[in-house]
Image: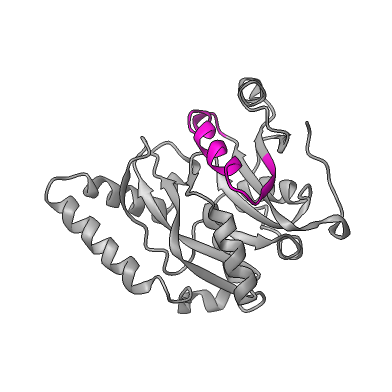
Amino acid sequence: MEATACTTENLQNNSVTAIVTAMTDNEKHFLPQALYAVLSDEHIDQVIVCFDEKNKSLQSSIRSNFKDARIELLPLPFMNIGAVRNRAIQSVKHSWLAFCDGDDVWMQNKTSQQLQYANKSNLDFVGTGHYLTNEAGQIQTHGLSIFIPMPSSWLVKTEVMKLFPFNESLNRRSDGDWWIRTHEKINKGKYPKILLKYRVRFQSVSMLSRSKKRKVLITQLAQLPLIGQLVKFSTFIIWQSTKRLNYLWLRKWEKQV
């Protein structure tokens, strides 16, 4: 089933569309786990899987292993992740959408909890906390999630993403650019629970970023006998002390608004 565009007027109000991106061959090993977690979420009624149109084996694997009618395949030429997500957004059928990278894993009923929180707090956007896992998926430490949430933790109104699309010219950090551009233009909130397992991989597109390099270092330190315990305890304390705060704004971002 191929994804098809729809109009804002036709969006259904009580469901969520998941946009799962798996544009690199390295993600195919982790994609089944990501899809199982997404499909188990009770509010997910559409799943758009974005993948490289040249990756015929991935397409075949998805179709043979997942018979769920909610899955729609969206083959695309290889492009920046912001452009990939923008293409998928045009095919969203529901009023809320959530992103999930093909190597990340949602916790149980992630979007269901976020949706309830968003409606209660009148929010356009809800992020959550996250664990950092090693490549095998084993939890190593708490992510801090102080300034900006991981894209795989986002729940956001579809109309917002259509009004403020990602910058397609950026080959990385398009989520950070979006976060800064939408400052005080939409209502953002943090749901004070950890609902994402973020997989730290060495072979990923984001490996060149300083943020990703920090995550790799923290994950490596967390696996050491003595230092690891200190790292795990420190990140737990930081998460506990900041989880109920709204996301903090960095002064250096002012010039980019």
- Is residue 39 or residue 151 the one in the foreground? 39
Q: Residue furthest front?
A: 42
Is residue 23 depicted above or below 236 in this figure? above
Asked if residue 189 shows in the view, the reply is: yes
- The way the protein has been coloured in the rendering is one colour
Q: Which image quadrant: the C terminus?
A: bottom right
Q: Is residue 41 magenta?
A: yes
- Is residue 103 or residue 216 the one in the foreground? 103
Q: Is residue 15 magenta?
A: no
- Is residue 116 or residue 123 the one in the foreground? 116
Query: On the picture, is 169 further left or further right than 236?
Result: right
Residue 151 drawn at (x, y percent): 54, 55
- Is residue 229 or residue 148 the one in the foreground? 229
**Which residue does the image show at 42% across and 56% down from the upper left?**
130
Marks counted in the figure total: 0
Is residue 236 depicted above or below 183 in this figure? above
Residue 115 drawn at (x, y percent): 62, 63
Is residue 221 depicted above or below 188 in this figure? above
**Which residue does the image show at 26% across and 45% down from the upper left?**
220
Query: On the picture, is 122 further left or further right than 143?
Result: right
Q: Which residues are magenta?
A: 24-48
Asked if residue 174 shows in the view, the reply is: no
**Which residue does the image show at 17% across and 53% down from the upper left?**
229
Q: Residue furthest left?
A: 226
Q: Which image quadrant: the N terminus?
A: top right
Residue 144 drawn at (x, y percent): 37, 63
Is residue 222 depicted above or below 191 in this figure? above
- Residue 183 lies in quadrant: bottom right
- Residue 80 lies in quadrant: top right
Residue 190 drawn at (x, y percent): 50, 69
